Image (spheres, rainbow, N blue to C red):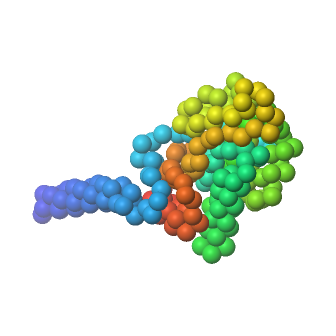
Amino acid sequence: MSKFIILLAAIVAISFGVYSYQQNIVSSGNIAKQLNHATYLYDQKSAIANYQLTDHNNNIFTPDSIKGAWTFWFFGFTHCPDICPITLGTLSASVNKLKTEHNIKDKIKIVFVSVDPERDNIEALKTYVSAFSQDAIGVTADDEKLAPFLKNMGIIAIKQDNDGKLSDYLIDHSSAVYLIAPDTGISAYFGAPHEVKNIVEDFLTIQKFYK
């Protein structure tokens, strides 16, 4: 009898292990299919590139600053005439919808990285992001710190100042939005165009699979 019990316990343990493994495979494989627009990246186990920036309250901003919160990252500049204000408005509406209509209790923040440190000082960043959301954080750094971070994140930013002849210049920049998990792992990439419905639904899907 004791051998039978041991054998039965072993079978149950093995079955449970196989089931758990299968569930993990199914979960990981299905999440990409469930997303409306985002590209799922968390399985790559990549953390956001190391950085030391400065936020709009003049505090040092590092990976530790976002631990424990979901963060939507967007890269732009305060003089941007269209893409930046539209995207920040969309992200603000998305975060608000998640909190009010879906009762998300997790911390969710928006991080706006200025690619124009020449004009976007601390005061300008604070005024700009505060106009969109209380959950928005404006950050930047000098070129020496900013350039490698942008490169590591795959963000392109090219100043169109006609060889220094334009003071009111524009910057061609990437319009991607990154979603970073509370452990600072890169969860997803959202390419343009950005829509509230897609961002909200994809966030809910990703959050469900996050452990």
Q: Is residue 27 left or right of residue 53?
A: left
Q: Which one is nearer the viewer's eye here, 14 or 185?
A: 185
In this rendered view, identify the residue nearer to me: 159 or 128: 159
In the rendered image, the residue lying farthest to the right is 123
Q: How many marks?
A: 0
In which quadrant will I find the N terminus? bottom left
Q: Residue at x 77, y 52 (%)?
A: 129
Q: Nearer the viewer, residue 150 or 54?
A: 150
Residue 49 in sight here = no
- Identify the residue at horizontal 58%, vertical 43% (top origin): 174
Relative placement, left or right, of 88 versus 154 is right
Q: Quadrant of residue 50?
A: top right
**Residue 84 appears in the picture as rendered:** yes
In the image, is residue 116 above or below residue 180? above
Q: Position of residue 196 (x, y in %)?
A: 59, 66
**Residue 118, image x, y percentages:** 79, 32
Q: Position of residue 153 (x, y in %)?
A: 56, 37
Residue lying at 62% horizontally and 32% vertically, measured from the top left: 149
Q: Residue at x 48, y 39 (%)?
A: 46
Q: Position of residue 60 (x, y in %)?
A: 76, 36
Whether 195 is drawn above or below 117: the answer is: below
Q: Residue furthest bottom?
A: 101
